[in-house]
Structures are given as structure tokens and as C-alpha cells.
Image (cartoon, rainbow, N blue to C red):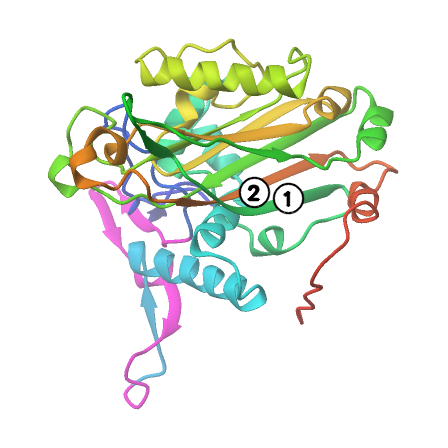
Amino acid sequence: MKPVAEAGGLSPFTTTTRTWDRAWPLKPEVVLEGGNAAKDELGAVGMASLNLLTTHNQPLDRLFTTSNATSAASALCAGMAAQIMAAYPHLRPETVRALLVHSAQWSEAMRGMFLPAAPNKDDYVHLIRHCGWGTPDLNRALWSAGDSLTLLVEDVVHPYAKVQGKGIVTRDMNLHSLPWPKDELEALQDTPVEMRITLSYFIEPNPSARGVASKYHYPSHRLRFDVQRPLDASTENFVARVNAAAQREDEGDPVNPSDPNWLLGERQRHRGSLHQDVWKGTAADLASRGFIAVYPSAGWWRTRPALERYGLPARYSLVVSIQTQQTDVDLYAAISQKIPVANVVVVDT
């Protein structure tokens, strides 16, 4: 007997979204250990030795048993979420979800199984629809290392408002300053850096519209993010560009000047209620990207005014991290000197 999946590969028990419509959410968001199956010339079969060991629910009969598939993976994910909540009890559920996904990484086996030698954006979508963003790492979710740092924002936006003579219109856009150590990044010049952004929020679903082709009918609201680009001459230019892009999307034309070096890009990442993307470039280029905008797009809170939900606020959590190769520049130390820490949380390890 041989195992079906190689070490670090996709479990044979995994459910994917490969056959879902392109407009539907990118699921799963993360994957965790779910055990394996065995195969021979006749077919595949489950084996207890390839499952995960766990405690039995009747310890007087036996102390241990095995678990696999969704039961095992969900328990592991819940355990990670619980440890994050224990370390930071004031975090919102949206933030806990964002941290889990933000910390996830693909194994080499996952990449080898679903990515060609020179992958494009569609190839990465194909990978995510099978493996999510990979397996979350609890240490990465909890800590920033010297060669990486993480910005976490919990905020509220009012997506829509009722204006006399205009009906329901888009209301607010939130602009967040990215407090990166600009001098230190510029000193790194052409050093490769990676910026990862995760936007997490919960919608109010419209179950009657489940499966409807229109992306406006099921979610109450949708949020988007965009990052300032080197060609944005000023913050005002950046805001004007984002406003124009939001207007075009509302009119059914989401075309926006391309921002290269994103793993997914604007057309691919904004699906569902958790949006993540990774930008790769030089440290000098990143130093010029000083702001990130979070703005609303249409949902049924706006398209169904008779229900009078258009005035509701929408919570969201934003996680942004940058990481460089190991250098003699400590990014974490540089930024910690500029931003006072309000509450120091000490967690025993």
C-alpha cells in the first residue's frame, strides 16, 4: 500500500471549488492536516495509521482514537483561532480570521501540484481554489520578526447613504497610512520585498439570492482595497483614482490601470468577503506606497432600498505585512521607535 497524497500535498479528503463560477468566492481560505488514504492496484482505502491521533470521547473505554478529513482539519483550525483569541482577547472575529489566512503559506508539494513553471494570475487562482492560501502558521500569526512586520487595523465604514434626488449612493472610503520606515526601505534600494494584504469582513447574506449570477444580490455589501502607486503624484491623486475606479465598477466596468507585481490583481482578488493579495517588488518601490484605501462596492443594502439597510455601518479588519530577505536592517525596530505601543501583551510560550 502507498499513500495517495505526498507529504505536504493536498489531502484526498479535501473539497475544492474548482468547478465554481469565476465570480464566486475563492474557497477554501486555508487548509490543515486531514490525514491521508492508501492505494494499491485495486483502488484507494482509508487506514487508521494515516489519520490523526486524538482523545476518545469515552476515556473509560479507551484513551485515544483517530480522526481525519474535515473533522480533524476543523479542530486544528479552531485550536489556532482559540490561541489567537486567548493571546489577544479584544480582537474581533474578523481579525482572527484575517490573521489565520494572512499567516498561511503553500508547501512546495502544493505549488508543484497546481502551478506551472511560470505561473500567471489564473494559475494562482487555480491553486487557491484547491489549497486556499496554504496552511496557517500560529507563530507567524502572533508575532512580527526582525525582518518582517505586520500592521493590523480594525475599523468601520459606512458603505451607503440615502441622498435626496439621487437615491442610495456610495458614502465613505477609509484611507489608512502605512507607517513603513521609509528611510530604511529606501536604503535597501533593489532588495526584494513582499507586501501581503488581507481584508476581512462579514456580510449579511440574502439566502433567497443564493446561486444567482449577479454578484450584487447575495452580499449585503462588498469592500475593496487599493494601494497607492508610484504614479499617484499625491494622496489627492490616489483618492481621485480610487473614486473613479469605484464609480466604474458600479457602472459594470471594473477596468482600472494595471498595477503590476500582484499575485492575483484587482480582477481576481475581490471575491467573497475575505480578500488577500501579495505584491512583490523592490524596497525602494514599496517606500513610495504610503496609503491603502478601503472602499465599498454595491450590495443588496444599496440595491434594495425598501429594506432600509443602507444606513448600517460595516466592520472590517485589515492586516498588512512586509517582509524582506535577511538583512542588517531591523524593520520592526525601526517602526517601533516611531509608533508608541498602547498596550503591551506578554504571552507565555
Residue position for label 1: 151
Whether residue 338 sits left or right of residue 10 in the image: it is right
| Quarter location, residue 245 | top left
Tell which of 238 and 308 is nearer to you: 308
| Quarter location, residue 223 | top left
* For residue 137, above or below residue 171: below
| Circle 1 SS class | strand
* For residue 300, above or below residue 314: above
Q: Residue furthest left?
A: 208
Residue 120 visible from this viewpoint:
no
Circle 1 Cα neighbour tier, 10 Å, few/some/many (<14 / 14–19 / ≥20): some
| Circle 2 SS class | strand
Disc 1 and disc 2: Cα gap in Å? 6 Å
The part of the chain drawn in magenta is 33-61
Residue position for label 2: 319
The disc, 1 or 2, on the residue closer to the chain's N-terminal end is 1
Q: Residue at x 63, y 24 (%)?
A: 280
Q: Amino acid at mark 1?
A: Leu
Tell which of 249 and 348 is nearer to you: 249
Q: Residue at x 32, y 35 (%)?
A: 221
Q: Is residue 87 magenta?
A: no
Quadrant in which the C terminus appears: bottom right
Q: Residue at x 34, y 38 (%)?
A: 27
Q: Amino acid at mark 2?
A: Val
Q: Are marks 1 and 2 in contact (CB under 8 Å)?
A: yes
Q: Residue furthest bottom?
A: 60
